[in-house]
Image (cartoon, rainbow, N blue to C red):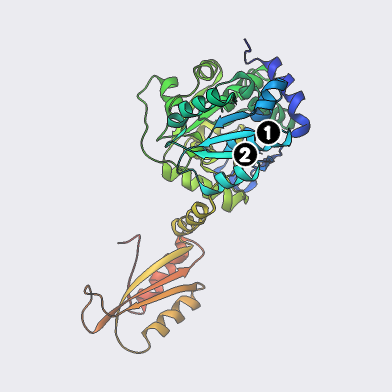
Amino acid sequence: MTHLTPDLIRDTYNAIRDATIRTPLVPATRLSLHLGIDLHLKLENLQHTNAFKARGALAKLLTLTEAQKRAGVIACSAGNHAQGVAYHATRLGIASTIVMPEGTPFNKVKRTEDFGATVILHGTGFDSSVQFTLDLAARDGLTFLHPFDDPVIAAGQGTTALEMLEQAPDLDCIVVPIGGGGLIAGMAVAAKAIKPEIEIIGAQAQLFDAAKAQFDGAPTNFDGATLAEGIAVKEPSAANLAVIKQHVTRIDSATEAEIEDAVFDLLSAEKLVAEGAPGAGLAVIKNNLAAYAGKKVGLVVCGGNIDSRLLSTLILRGLVRDGRITRLTFEISDTPGQLADISRIIGEAGANVVEVIHQRMMQSVSLKQAELEVVIEARDLGHVEDILQKLRAEGFRVRTDREG
């Protein structure tokens, strides 16, 4: 029986290194200045399939017998493992079938098909789809490639830590998102073998905190949809959990709002497209800055496969939170010149008018008044407050959505 060991991870690295990208480890300059810590980002979102999962998928495919290769493989995944299997299977001439939960973001389904896989949508999540996948594997004689409950898969993911410690041997801690536990188990075994004193910190979404609950001996939360759908796993691997309990310092979790803010931070500050899982990693760092003071911190940006429509909405919401997009609501007398005066004051204050909605028929205002909504683009919340003061000084009754 194969066990997850430093030697397995090193051998796996030698096997996959020519067909995977040695992704950069870069200083997060703006975020470090803003947060007051020394943060470095491992850009696994730059892998061939834009996620670390390609490492483990290739590692497993290389262990198949010729008969297994001819028969083909099958996997069950919300997206990143699917794309990793599809890409490398097609590259190696192996047929692949991927079972993806219904509701998987369209971009992940299309990219998986583009890599050459046959995609079947079934179930509402990994946990409800895996038995269906196993039944298909048995019926059609396919080899099942588990996304995390396999020492070879975990060894492939663990090669990420080998690269990080080659690129920055002085790292004090590494923050790793956790779903099924394959990435953090592999990375913990690899990193601890090289540098026993290094800290490995896990990150989870508060809505799906199975690994944290088992680590802490606390009740588990499973509640609704999460932005970090790639790590929304209800049952992490028992073998991975054993490694986590042995090598991981602690596991922290983040709320959906915190994860959303963190994904926006990575995009706006570092110009990196990241999905929710690495957002959880940055969020738990932001929640515990004192614990990282004076340390060189590595964060695995484990994937960048976020749905483009979701990303668009996330960006707009982030701009609203920062005050860079703000809706001003006025109650004005329905007389000529009001809009012109408002536009002049906003322009003179250095902001741009994005949209204007002039409503005369709202029952919330009197007959001779009108309600005016003006969406503006400003520098930040302080700039918005300055504009509000100027408008009110000119006699306008105005409020923002923040004020109610």
Q: From the image, tell me which residue sits under label 2.
A: 117
The kind of secondary structure element at disc 1 is helix
Q: Given the image, on which type of amino acid does mark 1 rest?
A: Ala
Q: Residue at x 48, y 24 (%)?
A: 236
| Mark 2 surroundings: few (<14), some (14-19) or many (≥20) residues within 10 A | many
Viewer-side residue, 371 vs 402: 371
Query: Residue 32: x, y in percent?
Result: 60, 43
User: Does residue 122 appear to the left or right of 47 in the view shown?
Assistant: left
Disc marking residue 89: 1
Contact between labelled residues 1 and 2, with CB atoms less than 8 Å apart: yes
Depth order, front residue of 148/91: 91
- Quarter of the picture containing the C terminus is bottom left
Q: Specify whether 115 is left or right of 368.
A: right
Amino acid type at mark 2:
Ala
Q: Is residue 284 left or right of residue 63?
A: left
Quadrant containing the N terminus in the rendered view? top right
- Residue 114 visible to an observer of this rendering: yes
Give how far across and how far down residue 60 sits, in percent: 66, 24
User: CA separation, marks 2 and 1?
Assistant: 8 Å
Residue extending farthest bottom = 336
Give neighbour class at mark 1: few <14, some 14-19, many 20+ (Cα, 10 Å): many
Q: Residue at 45% across / 20% down in the picture?
A: 215
Answer yes or no: is residue 170 visible. Answer: no
Q: Earlier in the sequence, mark 2 or mark 1?
A: 1
Helix, strand or loop at label 2? It is loop
Compared to residue 227, the image places residue 247 above or below, namely: above
The relative height of residue 395 versus residue 45 in the rendered view (above or below) is below
Residue 152 picture location, percent across and down: 64, 20
Residue at image x 44%, y 80%?
343
